[in-house]
Amino acid sequence: MPLISHPFLGLPIGDPGKIPLSREKLPTSKDVRLAAQELILSASGWRKIFAKPEIAAGYASWDYEQLPDNSLSPLLAPADIVIVAGMAIVFSSFIKEHCRPYKPIVLLGIDTRRTSPTIADIFARVLIGEGCEVRYLFIVPIPEITAYAAQTTALDVDHEFHSDGFVYISASHNPPGYNGVKFGLCGGVLKSEQIKPLISELKVFLSDPESSELALIALEKADARALTKCYENVAHWKRYSQSAYMLFAHSVFTDEETTEAQERILLEIANACEKRPFGIIAELNGSARTQSIDLDWLSALGAESKALNMEPGIFAHRIVPENESLDDCIKALQSAHEKNAAYALGYVPDCDGDRGNLVYYNNRLREAIPLEAQQVFALACLSELAYLKWKGETNRIAIVVNDATSMRIEAIAEVFGAKVFRTETGEANVVCRAERLRLEGWTVRILGEGSNGGNITHPSKVRDPLSTIGSMIRLLRLGDAQKNETCFNLWLEAIGSPERYQPDYDLEDVIESLPQWITTSAFEPNAALKIRTIDKIELKNTYQRLFLEDWPKIQPELEQRFDIVSWRAFASLGSDEWEIGSDFGASKNGGLRIVLYNKAGEPKAFLWMRASGTEPVFRILVDIRGGTYADEAWLRTWHKGLVAKADLLASPRQNNVG
């Protein structure tokens, strides 16, 4: 059977007749165990470097370092093929049990990494061989596949919008040599309690001496005709996917259930954009968003738009949309604004398209500059809370954030009478807590991880740059600006500064009105530490001893500099955060947040730490109210020094590992 290519993109989908693993080259059980040592398994996703180390020439438009994590090879080593097959076997068992006695319908999608079609081919073979129906969407951002999955109609299993679960192939913001997988049901990724048994089952599979043989058997079971049909139908299912996403995005943006109510809000925004044009740059960096609804959706809101770096899989810069990765967007926005002053905003997604960091044109500086991730989330929260007030919401309102989100969110929420709940870092954790709160009667319109940028807006269960852009557009264009009937008016009145309003206000005006907090960027080098201690409880217990010893010595300086006189420690594990006294190890492998208070008993700053669930690093962060970048650096240096010393002093047995 010939290789099947995408009918519009021309990119290879798969060869139904070519089984990716051969009996002659089966890896040994030792090979599989060694390859599996690099696996990162968490509720946030399963990841490792899958691309073979060699660089495939001609795949990139920029100069990658010659490192395995930046490899652009589409090939997988035989041991990694076994690992992926094991992942597919574990998920097929889960989804079949979940759907029993019906035949599961599984959506399959990929980002634009070179290894993604190879990994998807393995998943399609195993799932089809295990009796699942696979609807393969090929390149799709994760918010689109989750929107499609959210349309499921349990009473109509033959409906073309129905699905029972999804598999998404991506490593999000990790370098292109990495790849991985996320599993989901009903529009959201699996919760921590659902994914943990799957992780255990995968570990059992990979430790089995017969894992390679079992993987080969699973790969050989797929019917070639069913696999061919699956690959030939990608364009068909993609049309349904985009249709579902467009309808879902309108629902998210308007917070309205009926089409008529949605159209009313959309028309009001479009009319406002006609009176006062608004332009957006979409710098998509070859990501999965190059194959989605972005430009059509922006057009429906009445916004002008320009896109660049639109060829899927051709990365113009690093995948993580931080720091120098925003340069292309900054230059494009600068150029567009000089020709047309309506262009005021730009965004850059990561590879799976669930996060879009923003740049904006600063009229004071007369140049385009980036927004920090914490600023983006704060602005989105302000917009959504003001929108709820604009609509007349009377229910109890909550915001759910991760433990590393700036306390600026509490300051914003307090103004609108909303309450903030915190969880451990991890998208599934904030989604789970929000669902619990809704069952308790709360309205939870917005949630997310301020430290990572972007936001989740109900009924979405994943981050989506369209939600973030939508929040910005609504904040800047909804209502009658001349009559002082905008979301910005509601905010200024709530903080007691209505005199600051001008009818031609822009994003800079809103930013200047935010509570002033300085927070460590999650993606700066000083925030991601390479440590030797394997046991994170041991590390935190040692940090606790050092912190308690150091506190009496440093507290007078903290009081002099910041009016800080006391502290309280909080642990975040899964979807909860609670106070832990001086037992820092009680935070286990989750987040540890030490909140510092002033004489009035008000939170002034916090120190935070947690081992990353998706990268081999230990993350730290500090957050301080009313401070300067120098203040943030001073606190971070103290905090980092304690972590580094704790790492050195931790158990010698731990430090000798690796």
Image: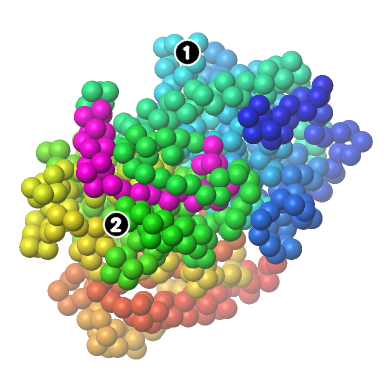
Q: Residue at x 43, y 30 (%)?
A: 245
- Tell me, yes or no, if residue 403 can be seen here: no
Q: Residue at x 17, y 48 (%)?
A: 487
Q: What element does badge 2 sit on?
A: helix
Q: Residue at x 71, y 50 (%)?
A: 59
Q: Is residue 601 above or below residue 107?
A: below
Q: What element does badge 1 sit on?
A: loop
Q: In which image quadrant can residue 170 be found?
A: top right
Q: In terms of depth relative to the viewer, which is nearer, 652 or 610?
A: 610
Residues drawn in magenta: 262-291
Q: In terms of depth relative to the viewer, which is nearer, 591 or 530?
A: 530
C-alpha span from label 1 to label 2: 40 Å
Q: Amino acid at mark 2?
A: Ala
Residue located beneath label 1 in the image: 159
Q: Residue at x 54, y 16 (%)?
A: 100
Q: Amino acid at mark 1?
A: His
Queried whether the magenta region covers residue 271, the answer comes back as yes
Q: Is residue 368 above or below residue 54?
A: below
* Badge 1 or badge 2: first in the primary sequence: 1
The total of numbered circles placed on residues is 2
Mark identifier at residue 378 = 2
